[in-house]
Image: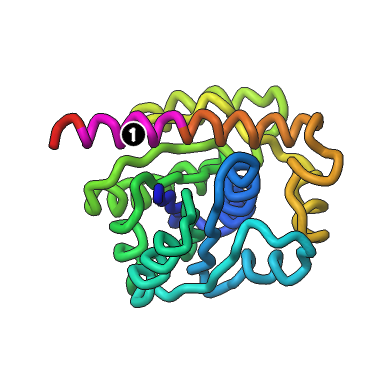
Amino acid sequence: MLTIAVFTQKGGSGKSTVSVHLAVAAGASMKVLLIDADPQATVAKWAAERSLPAPFVARAEPSSIEQVLAAGRAEGFDLAVIDCPPHVAAGTAALLRVADHISIPCQPTMPDMSATARSVALARATGKPFSFVLNRAPARAPEVAQAVEALSAGGPVSPVVIGDRRAYARALTNGLAVTEAGRASSKAAQEISGYWNWLYDKVRNEQWQIQQAA
């Protein structure tokens, strides 16, 4: 079972939105376990409004993450997506250590860009691969290209940028994702599908390299 942790030190970066949308996009072709490890419980609240059975959502504390993942493997899940706390809370490192890859969402703003250094430091301390994805990006803004260039100095950056669109908030309010309920052809859905495809290919390649080196 592949495990992806979505983490950033900066609150308000859209971390939970990215977690939900990754899980739903992946669920089109695999069995997905979405783990809410954020004390704010945004993912769990989204799931409470949802009528569809997948992805399966579980709450977890850092101290129980190993058991939750073990149960997921036993139940035949293909992928686990962990929505981590938006700061270095007690046990955050434990959540990152169980991941195969760490996704770091970042808005193209000065406070978000400044916060990435702390996120990267913790990711590197776990020894796990990580990458950035620009989130809530304004359309055709010069800050987007500048942010991509700046982030590239610290690690891989998704070529797919997630825009600042009301569609994301509207979908979450209704217990949905932008790739569902007739939204599959929207720009938001194309962004999420594109990001998931890029991330999945990247994680699979990383896993292949680890197996070759073993």
Q: Residue at x 33, y 68 (%)?
A: 66
What percent of the width, then of the height, locates residue 74?
A: 41, 63
Magenta segment's dominant SS is helix
In the picture, measured across the screen, residue 66 lies left or right of residue 30, that is left
The region drawn magenta spans 201-211
Which quarter of the picture shows residue 45?
Answer: bottom right
Secondary structure at badge 1 equals loop
Residue picked out by circle 1: 154
Looking at the rendering, in which quadrant would you find the C terminus? top left
Q: Spot the residue most to the right.
A: 182
In the picture, measured across the screen, residue 118 lies left or right of residue 127, that is right
Q: Spot the residue most to the left.
A: 214
Relative to 130, residue 43 above or below = below
| Residue 203 among those drawn in magenta | yes
Q: Residue at x 34, y 47 (%)?
A: 100
Q: Looking at the picture, which amino acid does disc 1 mark?
A: Gly
